[in-house]
Image (cartoon, rainbow, N blue to C red):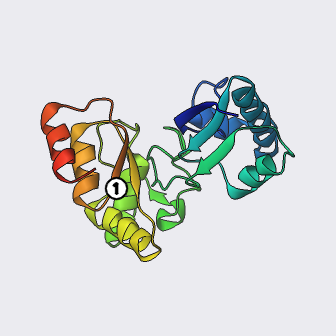
Amino acid sequence: CPGLVDAHVHVTANPVEIGLKVTYKNISSSMNYYKTAFLVRGMLLGGFATERDFGGANAALKEAISKWLIPGPWLVISGHAISQTRGHGSQKDSHDDGPTTTCCGGHNSGIGHLCDGTDACITVVRVLSKFNNLAHSQFLQEEITAITWTAELFDTYVNAHTYSNRRMQHMVENGAVGIEHSNFLDGDTAQFLVERNV
């Protein structure tokens, strides 16, 4: 039967929590499965026949719904989001700069972090960044290109979660073919996107 379609959701990010970091840091994955089952059932009962999950839902959830093990809408999924340390998908908060970091085994020397080589320098700057600003580009040009190029090799594509004009242009210039959110879109960036068939 016909129903509503939601073009952008994150069914594993339960809306009763304060935010994504709280959701994933304070809830076990097992409990999150139960909360997700409750959420998708509510979506179906609310009239949504299709949900486009843009980061979080996996193939097991999609299969469980299709086999009616869990009542829920038909899911179109992208899988887990790709993020980096301190990025939008990172679960570290401003006090998590200890041994969980990969840079130099999490070691610091008195007033500084030790880092040798380009990769370690990039990681330590990300670790020390104390906030995740929506205006930040987050991924470097080389990282975006590696992601989009690899996706193309597997006959798929990259959509980017972006809010600011600078980030939208940065992602598209480096191979992203779709933009999600774009809350701060201005006329110049809209024209930029149209010219590139995004």
Q: Is residue 141 left or right of residue 73?
A: left
Along the viewing direction, whichever of 74 and 187 lies nearer the viewer: 74
Relative side of 36 to 78, left or right: right
Instruction: Using a 10 Å C-alpha cutoff, classify the residue at mark 1 as few (fewer than 14 neighbours), some (14 to 19) or many (20 or more).
Output: some
Three-letter residue code for mark 1:
Phe
Look at 77% across and 31% down and name the residue there. Answer: 41
**In the shown orientation, is residue 126 left or right of residue 77?**
left
Residue 83 position in % (x across, y down): 47, 53
Does 129 sit above or below residue 109? above
- Residue 34: image location, x then y, percent: 82, 38
Residue 122, percent from left and from top: 34, 61
Which residue is at 70% across, 35% downward? 26
Residue of label 1? 139
Farthest bottom residue in view: 153
Visible in this render: residue 124? Answer: yes
| Residue drawn at 54 percent across, 44 percent down | 92
* Snapshot quadrant of residue 84: bottom left
Tag 1's secondary structure? loop
Q: Is residue 140 above or below residue 25?
A: below
Q: Residue at x 83, y 51 (%)?
A: 67
Q: Is residue 84 left or right of residue 96?
A: left
Q: Position of residue 80 (x, y in %)?
A: 57, 54
> Which residue reaches farthest front?
1
